[in-house]
Image (cartoon, rainbow, N blue to C red):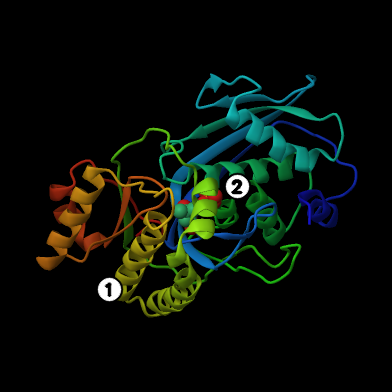
Amino acid sequence: MKRTDVVDRLLPKVVKASASVEQFAPSNIALCKYWGKRDRELNLPINASLSVSLDYLGSHTRLIPTEGQVDDVWLNGQQLQPGARFSQKVSEFIDLFRRDQNLYFKVETRNNIPTAAGLASSASGFAALTLALNDALALDLPPEHLSIMARMGSGSACRSLFTGFVEWRMGQRKDGLDSHGVQLEQQWPGFCIGLVEIDAGEKATDSRSGMQRTVETAHLYQSWPLQAAVDLGKLQQAIAERDFELLGQTAEQNALSMHATMIASWPPLLYWQPESVAAMQKVWQLRSQGLQVYFTMDAGPNLKLLFQRADRATLLQHFPNLETVEPFGC
Ligand code: PMV
């Protein structure tokens, strides 16, 4: 099925651009990872995933309707060439909403997280762009439909439409209309995430091609969907019971299992740098000394630490540059 077939089911045939708009969407960190697509055109996942949104860290996107015949894309204050990869991705995504009409925009995106460093700025970027297009074209789409549209930009973006804990239901349908984010009702005040930046540079292999390589070449990948399903259940239980140890253990093991499938691909896919491994060892050492800290990692070398507010000060002594976020506040 084509993306445009899905769009036909969600959007009106004729759309009209109104005023300039600005929207924000948070980045999100998966505790149970999305890794592997069953449909590459629609970004439909092989497994369900669960994330936590990062409050104020994410993307601000402004859309200004223009008279031009191309979109004018700006990223973090810099104008991009229409042929640049980022501009193309943005324009192709806006094509889904243009409905063949002559509607072009100046698009200004600002990320307050490092772009393409494994800190999921594509998730917040496509989510913010979806929200902005919804406003600019006065579409008034319900949250599930916004999530479905964002998913077609970048899979994990479907979770960035929501705050707090979010489950991405994998769905069964061919058109993916049942594959979107759902916000969990539970809150967890005092739950903290710390960003350990190892390298903010652009990564060599993006998650789209990394996933494809893993699915196609790693025998180990066969065990992934089952592990993800079991982990999702454990995380739901941990969140319902506020069992931090269960949450941390499950998230860390889930991330390492995903990375194991990448490493078992051919050619091998290893996002870690020596400093990533050193940071993991530091976490394990702190844990052996009784500190409740765990980590998760995405398609990049950076670590995201999971801990509780009571341990923040101690943790900062060991990771002095840690940027910390409390997704549920005090
Ligand atoms: O949505 P994508 O294509 O950027 O893939 C995200 C993949 C991971 O970040 C590694 C896992 C996840 O669930 O966010």
Residue 41 drawn at (x, y percent) = 69, 51
- Quadrant of the snapshot with the N terminus: bottom right
Residue neighbourhood size for the residue with mark 2, other residues' Cα within 10 Å, grouped as few (<14), some (14–19), many (≥20): many
Q: Is residue 25 visible?
A: no
| Amino acid identity at mark 1 | Glu
Mark 1 sits on what residue?
245
Residue 141 appears in the picture as rendered: yes
Q: Is residue 318 above or below residue 236?
A: above
Query: In this view of the protein, which residue sits in the foreground, 285 or 55?
Result: 285
Q: Which residue is mark 2?
A: 127
Instruction: Kindly identify the residue that appears in the image at 34 percent across and 60 percent down.
Output: 330
Horizontal side, residue 77 vs residue 307: left or right: right
Residue 198 lies in quadrant: top left
Q: Identify the secondary structure beneath mark 2.
A: helix
The amino acid beneath tag 2 is Ala
Residue 25: image location, x then y, percent: 55, 46
